[in-house]
Image (tube, rainbow, N blue to C red):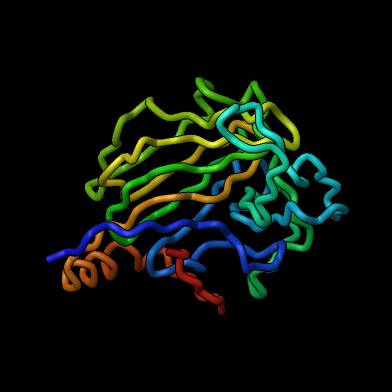
Amino acid sequence: MAGSASAAVIDFENFDPGRIIDDEYAPDVFISAINLSSGPDVALIFDTTDLNPASEDFDLVGPFDSDNASLSDNFSPGNVLIIQERNDCNFDSGFCATPDDEGSRPAGEFTFLFSSDIILETIDFFDIELIEDNGNPDSEIHLFDSNGDELLAGMFFVPSTGGNNKWNQLDFDSVRGVRKIVIELGGSGAIDNLHYQVVPVPAAAWLFGSAIGLLGWMRNRRRGAPAAST
């Protein structure tokens, strides 16, 4: 029998700036990105505590204030995840030289593929302009179950943060049965702190599903693989 769900968060800490993120959280989660402009298809670590980033991307430098009354000002998230804009990545080393979020509209999308069903709770967003926010078809968030069917289609969109150096949080109200998340970014911005609950499955079912569903996500690069913190 499967046990009760357990809380987890993906916060992108303990990675150096410029680290390419894909199988670092394997086998629990695989992460990828698509850049809709001329940049690489790379999900990358950006350090918001760097007060003098080489990219001069000061709109993602913390601390961040929030226009959401339920959230705190002066928030310092540390590392966040961006879609890389510059073509300065070395895929052998797993790093890009100058972390810089894609600023084209639309920018691209992140995909999170989980090895088992999760209950999705919240995701934090940073530097989302009003034109890129809720209701923009280029900023929709898609949730899929283990059969590939979309859950609550048209229900979730990237929230506006109010622009530069501001943050917001989207509450998914504990959507159950999520196996894949696709986050479309209508422009520049970053994400962090994906809070969810892991729904355990019997060991045999997990092994079978992992072998079939996650094989294509493995990369032949030497990486560390910290599990999502629980």
Percent of width and height locating residue 103? 71, 37
Q: Residue at x 59, y 31 (%)?
A: 186
In the picture, which quadrant includes the C terminus?
Answer: bottom left
Front one among 2 and 153: 2
Percent of width and height locating residue 195? 45, 50
In the picture, which quadrant includes the N terminus?
Answer: bottom left
The part of the image, by quadrant, that contains residue 108 is top right
Percent of width and height locating residue 157? 48, 29
Percent of width and height locating residue 36? 60, 40
Apparent side of residue 183 relative to residue 89 in the rendered image (left or right): left
Apparent side of residue 178 relative to residue 14 in the rendered image (left or right): left
Q: Residue at x 64, y 52 (%)?
A: 80
Q: Residue at x 70, y 55 (%)?
A: 46
The residue most toward the left is 1
Q: Is residue 112 above or below residue 134?
A: below
Q: Residue at x 50, y 57 (%)?
A: 10
